[in-house]
Amino acid sequence: MKFSQRQGLIPVRELLRDRVSDELRAEIWNTLRATYWSALKPGRIGLMVVEEDFIEHHEITKLSNVLWKKHWKRSIDSRPSYAEPVFEEIKRYFFNCEWFRFYDLLEFLIAYYEARFNDSELSYWINEHLKNEGSAYRIIHGVVSEVTNEEEISLLEETLAK
């Protein structure tokens, strides 16, 4: 809670259940961009140049292939041919989709990146953003789950870990 909220100068927000704030979308987008997409350089999909120490085999090509085919159920030839328009389309969707489609996309991205890199760090950072921005949801074992308090989160995590 911020100082201004503790002092009663700015109202404390209720948990967000049926919407996603612009701030939450921006925090998660920035994490995704910095973690997975920062080294990408403009170029044609499939021929894109990436920094040598980044990810082999053109990360945006792999992500966008799966995103278009499996998650959005779109024809692959509807995907733009260049990296920046792909990012712009993903970003436009990310910032403008309905709240429940946003969480669908988060589950997809978490499953994709956690399988790809065998790493649960993305869930950790998304949960930090969800908590800090007052979302009524947390990522528990890759699934967006509604929670009412921190005790419930711990209990759900323990149950799912068994």
Image (cartoon, helix red, strand yellow):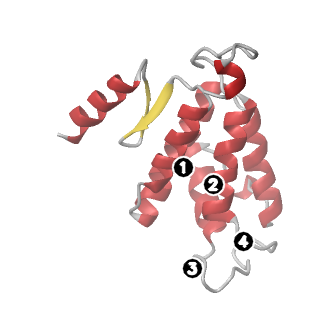
Badge 3 or badge 4: first in the primary sequence: 4
Badge 1 or badge 2: first in the primary sequence: 2
Q: Label 4's element?
A: loop
Q: Quadrant of the C terminus?
A: top left
Q: Report the side of 135 relative to 44 (left or right).
A: left
Q: Label 2's element?
A: helix
Q: Which tag is nearer the camera, tag 3 or tag 2?
A: 2
The answer to whether one can see residue 81 in this image is no
Residue annotated with mark 2:
32
Q: Residue lying furthest left in this view? A: 162
Badge 4 or badge 1: first in the primary sequence: 4
Q: Distance between the Cα atoms at labels 1 and 3?
A: 18 Å
Q: Label 1's element?
A: helix
Residue annotated with mark 1:
109
Q: Report the side of 10 relative to 145 (left or right).
A: right
Q: Residue lying furthest bottom in this view? A: 52
Badge 4 or badge 2: first in the primary sequence: 2
Residue annotated with mark 4:
40
Crowding around mark 4 (Cα neighbors within 10 Å: few <14, some 14 to 19, many 20+) is: some
- Residue at left offset 69%, top offset 38%: 25
24 or 141: nearer the eye? 24
Q: Are marks 3 and 4 in contact (CB under 8 Å)?
A: no
- Residue at left offset 39%, top offset 26%: 150
- The vertical placement of 93 against 57, above or below, is above
Q: Distance between the Cα atoms at labels 3 and 4?
A: 11 Å
Q: Distance between the Cα atoms at labels 3 and 2?
A: 18 Å
